[in-house]
Amino acid sequence: MPAIMPTAVKFAFAFAVFAVLVALPFTCGKSTLHVERDDNLPARVPYVFPAPGTDKVADMIRSRRTNGTLLDLDGVLLNDQNLASTWSDLAGMIRDQNAIPANMRELFILRTGVLNDAAYVWLQHESVARSVGFTTAQLREIRFRPAFAHQALPSTPLNSSQNAAMLLADFMTKNVNVPQPVFDGLKKFLNNQQMVDAVATVGVYNLVSRFVEALNVDDKMDVPVPVPQ
């Protein structure tokens, strides 16, 4: 009997490991062992999700995505390999090599999404904003403050630099022309490189929000921007 026990234990352990592996998520055409960030609803063009290791551009995009998971946005972009590659380089710079503080970057992204009614952008970035320190009260301010509201509000959960950033995003997105006092209001907190990156961030995410809306990525075109809870 004692000689049989080690084999039985090994068998039981192997079975347990097999059961865990079977239970792990798997989706055809996307990477395994990932966390979904989309609802996998259709867009106005088909998604292109090459299998891992079969497409250099798709694999390059995977390398900068959480757990190597392609988003529905990526699946739309991969209809045009040149666009997908160039887009990924620019988006990677904005997301990962930006000179402005991470919380200001996410404020620009969320505010631009709100002003363009791009629920997809908000859904992708609310959790990122929380991870860099935004509270629910601050997210609600970004979500609900009327465009062009003066930064000297009687009560706001945002600080002075964040209020100045909100105003820049509002004018760039809704008015295009940015008045000198609005530009100077943010310049008090940023150096020249950071100002260029700030403007680039708002500009790029105006592109992103308009792109995902026009192509109805993840069927979010008519979905209201969520209310932070």
Image (cartoon, grey):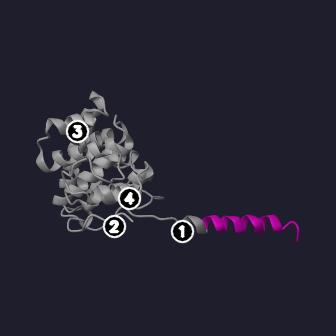
The residues tagged by marks 3 and 4 sit, at their Cα atoms, a distance apart of: 25 Å
Residue 79 percent location from the top left of the image: 22, 53
The residues tagged by marks 3 and 2 sit, at their Cα atoms, a distance apart of: 31 Å
Which numbered disc, 3 or 2, marks the residue closer to the eye?
3
The residues tagged by marks 4 and 2 sit, at their Cα atoms, a distance apart of: 26 Å
* 101 over 174 or under it: above or below: above
Residue beneath label 2, please?
39
The residues tagged by marks 2 and 1 sit, at their Cα atoms, a distance apart of: 20 Å
The disc, 4 or 1, on the residue closer to the chain's N-terminal end is 1
Residue beneath label 1, please?
23
The disc, 3 or 2, on the residue closer to the chain's N-terminal end is 2
Quarter location, residue 17: bottom right
Residue 30 percent location from the top left of the image: 38, 58
- Residue type indicated by callout 4: Ala
Q: For the residue labelled by badge 4, is the local secondary structure a helix, a strand or a loop? A: helix
Pointer 1: residues within 10 angstroms few (<14), some, or many (20+)? Answer: few
* 153 over 29 or under it: above or below: above
Looking at the image, the residue that sits furthest to the right is: 2
Residue beneath label 4, please?
137
Q: Which residues are magenta?
A: 1-18
